[in-house]
Amino acid sequence: MGAASLDLTALAAGQLDIYFERMLQPWDHAAGVLIAREAGAEIRGWNGSPPDIDWLLASHPDVIDEIESVLVTAGAHFDLR
Protein backbone atom coordinates (compact mmCIF):
# COMPACT_ATOMS: atom_id res chain seq x y z
CA MET A 1 0.00 0.00 0.00
CA GLY A 2 2.83 2.37 0.71
CA ALA A 3 2.27 3.87 4.16
CA ALA A 4 3.22 1.72 7.15
CA SER A 5 0.16 2.75 9.15
CA LEU A 6 -2.15 1.78 6.27
CA ASP A 7 -0.43 -1.59 5.96
CA LEU A 8 -0.79 -2.20 9.69
CA THR A 9 -4.49 -1.31 9.60
CA ALA A 10 -4.88 -3.81 6.74
CA LEU A 11 -3.29 -6.39 9.04
CA ALA A 12 -5.75 -5.41 11.77
CA ALA A 13 -8.65 -5.83 9.32
CA GLY A 14 -7.50 -9.31 8.31
CA GLN A 15 -6.42 -8.26 4.81
CA LEU A 16 -2.76 -9.09 5.53
CA ASP A 17 -1.27 -11.91 7.58
CA ILE A 18 2.20 -10.46 8.10
CA TYR A 19 3.78 -7.04 8.12
CA PHE A 20 7.56 -6.63 8.23
CA GLU A 21 9.63 -3.51 7.69
CA ARG A 22 13.01 -2.07 8.54
CA MET A 23 14.11 1.56 8.78
CA LEU A 24 10.78 3.06 9.88
CA GLN A 25 10.59 6.05 12.16
CA PRO A 26 8.07 5.92 15.03
CA TRP A 27 5.81 8.47 13.34
CA ASP A 28 5.59 6.17 10.31
CA HIS A 29 3.98 3.34 12.24
CA ALA A 30 2.68 4.58 15.63
CA ALA A 31 -1.00 4.86 14.68
CA GLY A 32 -0.99 1.59 12.77
CA VAL A 33 0.74 -0.26 15.62
CA LEU A 34 -1.94 0.91 18.04
CA ILE A 35 -4.76 -0.22 15.75
CA ALA A 36 -3.14 -3.58 15.00
CA ARG A 37 -2.47 -4.27 18.70
CA GLU A 38 -6.07 -3.44 19.57
CA ALA A 39 -7.15 -5.96 16.92
CA GLY A 40 -5.01 -8.67 18.57
CA ALA A 41 -1.81 -8.56 16.53
CA GLU A 42 1.58 -8.93 18.16
CA ILE A 43 4.06 -6.23 17.23
CA ARG A 44 7.72 -6.62 18.02
CA GLY A 45 11.23 -5.59 17.16
CA TRP A 46 14.26 -7.76 16.62
CA ASN A 47 14.47 -10.79 18.90
CA GLY A 48 11.34 -9.92 20.87
CA SER A 49 12.32 -6.38 21.76
CA PRO A 50 9.98 -3.41 21.26
CA PRO A 51 9.74 -2.30 17.62
CA ASP A 52 12.30 0.30 16.59
CA ILE A 53 13.92 1.76 13.49
CA ASP A 54 15.79 -1.50 12.83
CA TRP A 55 12.93 -3.99 12.88
CA LEU A 56 9.14 -4.04 13.00
CA LEU A 57 7.30 -7.35 12.65
CA ALA A 58 3.55 -7.72 13.09
CA SER A 59 1.38 -10.81 12.86
CA HIS A 60 -0.93 -13.10 14.79
CA PRO A 61 0.66 -14.11 18.12
CA ASP A 62 0.39 -17.83 17.25
CA VAL A 63 2.70 -17.57 14.23
CA ILE A 64 4.99 -14.60 14.88
CA ASP A 65 7.87 -16.72 16.25
CA GLU A 66 7.83 -18.91 13.15
CA ILE A 67 7.70 -15.87 10.87
CA GLU A 68 10.65 -14.27 12.65
CA SER A 69 12.61 -17.51 12.26
CA VAL A 70 11.93 -17.55 8.51
CA LEU A 71 13.03 -13.90 8.22
CA VAL A 72 16.26 -14.62 10.10
CA THR A 73 16.95 -17.67 7.91
CA ALA A 74 16.43 -15.46 4.86
CA GLY A 75 18.95 -12.93 6.23
CA ALA A 76 16.55 -10.13 7.11
CA HIS A 77 18.46 -9.50 10.35
CA PHE A 78 21.70 -8.75 8.51
CA ASP A 79 23.41 -5.53 9.56
CA LEU A 80 21.35 -4.87 12.69
CA ARG A 81 23.04 -2.60 15.21
Image: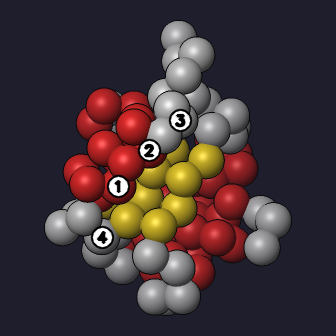
Whole-number angstrom distance, CA of label 4 to CA of label 2? 15 Å
Q: Which amino acid does label 3 sit on?
A: Ala
Assess whether mark 2 and mark 3 are in contact (beta carbons under 8 angstroms).
yes
Q: Residue 67 carries which label?
A: 1
Assess whether mark 4 and mark 3 are in contact (beta carbons under 8 angstroms): no
Between discs 3 and 4, the one toward the N terminus: 4
| Mark 1 Cα shell of 10 Å, populated few (<14), some (14-19), many (≥20) | some
3D distance between C-alphas at marks 1 and 2: 6 Å
Q: Which of pointers 4 and 2 lies earlier in the amino acid sequence?
A: 4
Q: Which mark is residue 76?
A: 3
What amino acid is found at the position of numbered circle 1 in the picture?
Ile
Question: Is 31 situated above or below 30?
Answer: below
Disc on the earlier residue, 3 or 2: 2
Kind of element beneath mark 4: loop
Residue positioned most to the right: 2
Identify the element where label 2 is drawn: helix
Query: Closer to the N terminus: mark 1 or mark 3?
Result: 1
Can you give x and y, in whole percent of width and height, for residue 71 in the image?
A: 44, 44
The amino acid at mark 2 is Leu
Q: Residue at x 53, y 35 (%)?
A: 76
Horizontal arrangement in the rendering, residue 50 relative to residue 1 (left or right):
left
Mark 1 touches mark 2? (CB < 8 Å) = yes
Determine contact: label 4, label 2, CB under 8 Å: no
Q: Where is residue 65 in the image (x, y as percent from the top left)?
A: 24, 51
Q: Residues within 10 Å of mark 4 (few under 14, many from 20)?
A: many
Where is mark 2, residue-wise?
71
Judge from the rendering whether residue 9 lies leftward or rightward of residue 72; answer left or right.
Answer: right
Residue that mark 4 sits on: 60
Q: How far is mark 1 from mark 4, CA to CA?
A: 10 Å
